[in-house]
Image: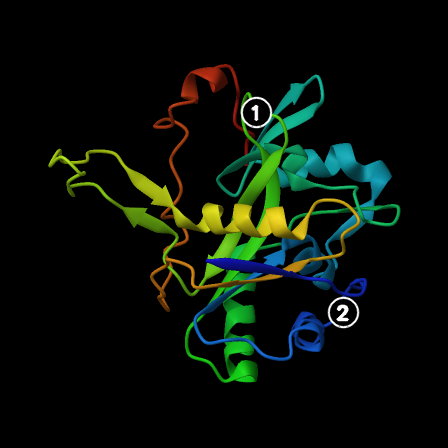
Amino acid sequence: MKVSAIKTRLFKEREALERFIAQHIPKLKNGSILAVTSKIIALSEGRTANGKDEAKLIRIESDWVMPTRYGSLTLKDGLLMWNAGIDESNAKGKIVLLPKDSFTAATKLRSALKKYYHIKKLGIVITDSRIMPLRAGVVGVALGYAGFKGLRDYRGKKDLFGRKLKFTQTDVADSLATAATLAMGEGSERRPLAIITDAPVAFSGKINKNELRISLEDDMYRPLFKTTKRKKK
């Protein structure tokens, strides 16, 4: 698998995303996966706000909130994240929210780019970064994706010694997002796009957006959130 991050000019708010991608990627190989940072997806949607509204927006954007020493631990779109994904970095004085619907954005972008590049197999993964419990630094996370199966299931198959696997599954989407995030960087690199080729994925036109989700009640970290109350809708 090869990951190539693409250096670009600065992306402007409400700019046409497909045109921006075409300007920086003249050709795209059939069977590629294009990683796109959630920030330029959100900017293309105009998902920005004044920094003074951050605390209010965190509550609005989250399904539930747990205040902590360094910010708010929140649940949004089935993902555990800090401050509902609202970010001040590389925002030129504003704050940038997450895309409105990352799966819909990925599907629309895939459809447009397939036509533009005249290819049949294309995956899109919309990336963000997150902090893992008890680990320093960030890794990538797939907020949304299209064109490939996000989960590889080994349950019922046998390991090297014939033992049947009961629980093992591979999170393909987040693994690709992490690889892309490492290549794109988190600072002033200005590389919001990455092309992934020869990835071991199963391309598919139909995506189950809930295939990676685990309910809070069934999650192994559930004991940490027993005192957390869900926000009333």
Q: Residue at x 76, y 66 (%)?
A: 14
Q: Type of residue at label 2?
A: Glu
Instruction: Point out the image quarter for the C terminus.
Output: top right
Instruction: Point out the image quarter for the N terminus.
Output: bottom left
Q: Residue at x 84, y 40 (%)?
A: 51
**Picture coordinates of residue 162, whole percent (x, y):** 11, 37
Does 84 appear above or below 142? above
Does 56 appear above or below 43? above
Label 1 sits on a secondary structure element that is loop
Q: Which residue is mark 1?
A: 135
Which of the two discs, 1 and 2, labels the residue nearer the N terminus? 2
Q: Which residue is mark 2?
A: 15
Give the side of residue 195 with respect to residue 169, left or right: right
Front residue of 197/61: it is 197
How is the model colour-coded? rainbow
Location of residue 137 by image quarter = top right
Q: Type of residue at label 1?
A: Arg
Label 2 sits on a secondary structure element that is loop
Bin the neighbour count of mark 2 within 10 Å (Cα to Cα): few under 14, some 14-19, many 20 and up: some
Does 164 appear above or below 2? above
Q: Residue furthest right?
A: 93
Q: Residue furthest left?
A: 162
**Picture coordinates of residue 93, whole percent (x, y):** 88, 46
Bin the neighbour count of mark 1 within 10 Å (Cα to Cα): few under 14, some 14-19, many 20 and up: few
Q: For the residues carrying marks 1 and 2, which lies nearer the camera in this image?
A: 1
**Picture coordinates of residue 150, whole percent (x, y):** 39, 52
Front residue of 116/49: it is 116
Front residue of 78/174: it is 174
Identify the disc placed on residue 174: none
